[in-house]
Amino acid sequence: MIDKETRIKIAIQKSGRLTDHSLDLLQRCGLKYTRARDQLICFGENMPLDILLVRDDDIPALVRDDVCDLGFVGLNIVEETRLGSGEDNDSETEHFSVLRRMDYGHCRLSFGYPEDGPVQSASQLNGRRIATSYPNIVNDYLKRESVDAEVVEFSGAVEIAPSLGRADVICDLVSTGTTMAAHKIREGETLLESEAVILQTPVALPAGKQQWIDRLMQRIDGVMQVRESKYIMMHAPKSALARISELLPGSEAPTVLPLEGLDDIVAVHVVCRETVFWETLENLKGAGASSVLVVPVEKMLA
Ligand code: ATP
Ligand code: ZN
């Protein structure tokens, strides 16, 4: 039995596109876990935290109904559930508090027009049939745009609806666009840009639990920051320091250290929070730097 008072319950997708990223993120935050024999729960060994593995569509309701304290799920599912529960304003409501947007699960919900079909833009949707797994989001869009079209709900394989004669247009998730292209469907207007988010229950939590959640969020911020971050070390003439600072993307004030026996050359150490390209290194060299070393950052606590 899981102790609800003290242990945090996190819902993540059981198996699908978000599963590995979500588990990896928690592991990078230091969590060690064992998976129960039924494969549905992972018990945290070194944190008061357990993971429930469920279908992604169920995650927003599990968090809203306080079965789980946190949920890692696509914003597309959050929006679809939110609109389905009759909350048709734009703000995130008290039922879904989105704690973080994360840097994985990127996709967009877009219209798709069969290349040889009668509809080629959203302005031609009146009187047409739209196949989608996101009826609430599509209906919300149609309402806002005062378009009179029929929404045909498909639970999967939406892209085959036009060739089955079930719809004129589709509205589906796209990341690379290859699925639509393979079905001779052209991607049109985007209704929603999505990525994985962390949802928190609307119910106030005991202080100890909330403290662990705050701690986890701080670690998640650290993990997300170090993804692109690099530690750069180099030697440089003192006179080039200003130019070198300008060249380093997303960096804070550099640490400047004297070098034994050298007066005008110093060692410069700096953390860059953005991708460091070869071009940046070449420019540093051009500005007078030498012995430039770039190393990955493993952990960071702001
Ligand atoms: P489940 O069995 O949990 O219901 P599913 O088939 O609904 O799984 P997946 O296909 O694994 O879900 O997608 C999970 C989430 O990944 C989506 O809800 C979306 O947020 C994100 N995603 C990212 N890129 C894509 C894409 N190209 N197509 C579909 N989903 C994507
Ligand atoms: Zn799903």
Image (cartoon, grey):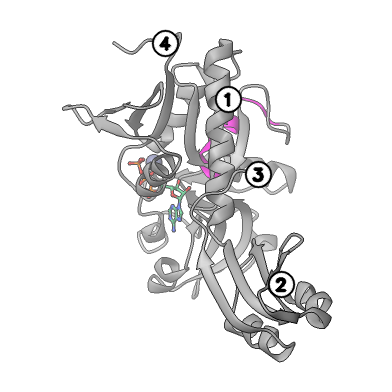
Question: Viewer-nearest of labels 2 and 1?
Answer: 2
Which residue sits at x=54%, y=26%?
213
Instruction: Name the residue beneath numbered marker 3.
Output: 302
Which residue sits at x=64%, y=65%?
274
User: Could you give the CA–CA distance between mark 3 and mark 1, rounded to whole angstroms?
Assistant: 38 Å
Left or right placement of residue 197 versus residue 254 in this view: left
Instruction: Name the residue beneath numbered marker 1.
Output: 85
Residue at the left extreme?
Answer: 37
Instruction: Name the residue beneath numbered marker 4.
Output: 4
User: Could you give the CA–CA distance between mark 2 and mark 1, rounded to whole angstroms?
Assistant: 47 Å
Label 1 or label 4, whichever comes before in sequence order: 4
Mark 3 touching mark 4, by CB under 8 A?
A: no
Which residue sits at x=66%, y=46%?
142
Question: Viewer-nearest of labels 3 and 4?
Answer: 3
Q: Name the secondary structure under disc 2.
A: loop
User: Could you give the CA–CA distance between mark 2 and mark 4, rounded to whole angstroms?
Assistant: 47 Å
Question: Which stretch did the figure color magenta?
Answer: 75-88
Label 2 or label 4, whichever comes before in sequence order: 4
Amino acid type, mark 4: Lys
User: Could you give the CA–CA distance between mark 3 and mark 4, rounded to whole angstroms?
Assistant: 31 Å
Q: Is residue 4 magenta?
A: no
